[in-house]
Image: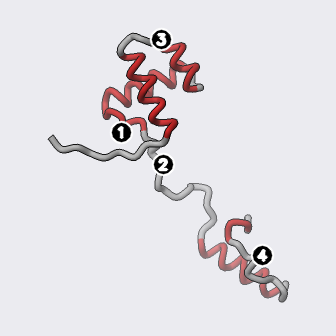
Amino acid sequence: MQTEIVSMSQQELEKVHVIERIMARRLSQTTGAKQLGLSTRQLRCLMGCYQHAGAKGLISKGRGKPSNNRVSETICTEAIGLIQSHYHDFGPTLRSINTITV
């Protein structure tokens, strides 16, 4: 049997502990949902993911992926070029890509 290392946040680890207690019938779904700040429907969905894929099923699927709401590099460079052409004193301190919103 091959062991797999899974990196989880503290919040995801808490979900594992609560779900295991619910499945062992030491905790009700309602109480577990309140502890995690979820609805019972969301908790049942997480329990299904846990039963299907184990602890790996509770890891956020968006981890490590870029945001869907990000501004592309070409737009950032165009914006910086436009700003520099109109404001000659626009220096690198003010030019952080994260602060430019289009």
Question: What residue does disc 2 label?
Answer: 62
Q: Hey, which quadrant is residue 102 in on the image?
A: bottom right
Helix, strand or loop for disc 1: helix
Q: CA distance from mark 2 to mark 3?
A: 29 Å
Question: What residue does disc 3 label?
Answer: 28
Question: What residue does disc 4 label?
Answer: 94
Reply above or below: 7 against 40: below
Density class for disc 2 (Cα within 10 Å; few <14, some 14-19, many ≥20) is few
Question: What residue does disc 1 label?
Answer: 56
Work out whether mark 3 precedes mark 4 in sequence or the reverse, and give the earlier one: 3
Work out whether mark 2 precedes mark 3 in sequence or the reverse, and give the earlier one: 3
Helix, strand or loop for disc 3: loop
Density class for disc 1 (Cα within 10 Å; few <14, some 14-19, many ≥20) is some
Work out whether mark 2 precedes mark 4 in sequence or the reverse, and give the earlier one: 2
Q: CA distance from mark 3 to mark 1?
A: 23 Å
Reply above or below: 91 against 38: below
Image-based side of 58 in relation to 5, left or right: right
Q: CA distance from mark 2 to mark 1?
A: 13 Å
From the viewer's side, name the closer residue of 41 and 36.
36
Q: Amino acid at mark 2?
A: Gly
Helix, strand or loop for disc 2: loop
Image quarter where the N terminus lies is top left
Q: Amino acid at mark 4?
A: Leu
Residue 98: horizontal and vertical position, in percent? 68, 66
Work out whether mark 3 precedes mark 1 in sequence or the reverse, and give the earlier one: 3
Residue 22: horizontal and vertical position, in percent? 42, 16
The residue mark sitting in front, 2 or 4, is: 4
